[in-house]
Image (cartoon, grey):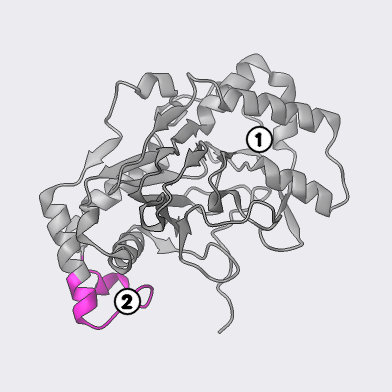
Amino acid sequence: MSLILKEKLTGPSAWRGADLRNDDSWIIQLSQEAITLIDKALTTVKNNGLSFPNFTKDDFPIHAWSDELASYAEEMENGKGFILLRGLPIGDYDSDDLDIINYGIGLHLGTPVCQNLKGSLLEKVENVGDITKKETRVYETNLYLPYHTDLSDVFGLMCVRQAKSGGLTSLVSSGAVYNQLLEEYPEYLGVFYRPMYYAHLGTDSSNKAPVFSYHAGKLSCRYLRQYIELGAELQDRPLSRVEVEAMDVLDNILHDEDIRLDMMLEPGDLLLANNYSVMHSRTSFEDFEEVDKRRKLVRLWVKMPNARALAPDFPGQNGFPPPEA
């Protein structure tokens, strides 16, 4: 079971945004060799008459890049928890090509998993949703997207187009947030180790998990306040005053300018991050009138072979079960 961590978390995973603003070591410029390898793998898939998602790791042969990909996986699990790959020549590819490339990289990192009950292995993050409908996910709008974690070991966001204005991506270290809670609000820590109900997206059911879990020497986090509130509603169990207060405190810490790291993703960027150690957010944005110019990102969820062990009361959820044929 999880133990309550009562000492400050140390190491590279407990970074603060203020310490990284003049440190771009987390940005990895793709080499021409890597780009050439990706191009050749894309050509191999297409020449074999294959398309997303109906191909395997071996069908997308970037094995010569495997050592670097392994180092990225190590950084996500045991380093800062995230990296940004920059420099993919996005204008050289159409939408189908980018799906093949994104999914192909995912296959070499681990196992891409379904992101909804429909079985989508890649999700378009675009302003296409109706904000008047309750079932509309926030990432389908241009509204502010609160800090949260996704339901996978690692998420990837490939930027295809930027918005006309806004749409800033922010990351925070769960470890740094925890350290601030420990230092300034230790009375709330127990609340975050108590399992809460999270709504299952797109269903009328929920499951239980704490926000923080310390197990086998690692601190893990799962947080999405909207779905904790919805989970309490589905269970007909209103959140207590102290639970609301604790999440208000957590949200205030998440917006601390010294905690967060802001970045504007550029076309051709691929942001990869560990959901257990990094939370992410996005500011609201204004889109172009022309549909083909509007902001577009493509999201990938990956189950990783080097993922940490999780406590029994902190069940991992790598996506949704594939729909039955």
Percent across and percent down for residue 58 are 26, 73
Q: Is residue 183 magenta?
A: no
Drawn side of residue 283 relative to residue 315, left or right: left
Residue 102 got which mark? Answer: none
| Residue matched to label 2 | 51
Residue 52 among magenta residues: yes
Question: The disc labelled 2 sits on which kind of residue?
Answer: Ser
Please identify the quarter of the rendering in which residue 250 is found. top right
Name the residue type under label 1: Leu
Q: Earlier in the sequence, mark 1 or mark 2?
A: 1
| Residue 75 screen position, x and y as percent | 34, 40
Q: CA distance from mark 1 to mark 2?
A: 46 Å
Would you call the spot at circle 1 few (<14 residues within 10 Å), some (14-19), or many (20 or more)?
Answer: some
Q: Residue at x 53, y 71 (%)?
A: 119
Q: Which residues are magenta?
A: 43-61
Decide: is 235 above or below 180.
below
Q: Quadrant of the C terminus?
A: bottom right
Residue 46 visible to the viewer: yes
Residue that extends furthest to the top in the rendered view of this protein: 184
Q: Could you say which is closer to the camera, residue 243 or residue 68?
A: 243
Q: Which residue in the structure is indicated by mark 1?
A: 3
Q: Is residue 133 above or below residue 269?
A: below
Q: Quadrant of residue 254?
A: top right
Residue 115 percent location from the top left of the image: 53, 62
